[in-house]
Amino acid sequence: MVVELKPDGVDKGAAVERFLALPPFAGRRPLAAGDDVTDEDSFAAALRHDGIALQVGDREPTVASRRLPDPAAMREWIAHLAAAR
């Protein structure tokens, strides 16, 4: 179990927006991945910037555009991306 502490009015979507406003992230396509309801704001921000929103697990509802079944599948997907580079 995790407890997230943050200031009022700040969420993971705001963090994505802030990163994308700074070099070297400006103009890049974001990828937001997560398994928790607190990840939904980052999913929405990624999608606003033509990015990828990836839900890990089967939690509903979600705005994520893609889904992987579990953390093992996420690790496998990252390994595949790394090997392709």
Image: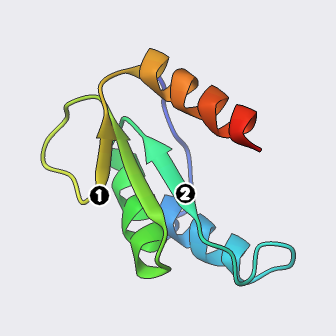
21, above or below 30, in the image: below
Would residue 81 be found to the left or right of residue 46 on screen?
right
Would residue 65 be found to the left or right of residue 59 on screen?
right
Percent of width and height locating residue 4: 51, 39
Q: Which mark is residue 21?
A: none
List the residue tagged with mark 2.
Answer: 31
Judge the density around disc 2: few (<14), some (14-19), many (≥20) Cα neighbours within 10 Å: some
The answer for how far apart the CA atoms under marks 2 and 1 are is 11 Å
Q: Residue at x 31, y 49 (%)?
A: 66
Q: Residue at x 39, y 47 (%)?
A: 54
Would residue 46 be found to the left or right of residue 28 on screen?
left
Question: Depth check: 70 or 83 in front?
Answer: 83
Question: Depth check: 11 or 46 in front?
Answer: 46
37, above or below 11, in the image: above
> Looking at the rendering, in which quadrant would you find the C terminus?
top right
Amino acid at pointer 1: Ser
Can residue 42 be seen in this snapshot? yes
Percent of width and height locating residue 75: 56, 23
List the residue tagged with mark 1.
Answer: 65
Q: Secondary structure at mark 2?
A: strand
76, above or below 83, in the image: above
> Looking at the rendering, in which quadrant would you find the N terminus?
top left
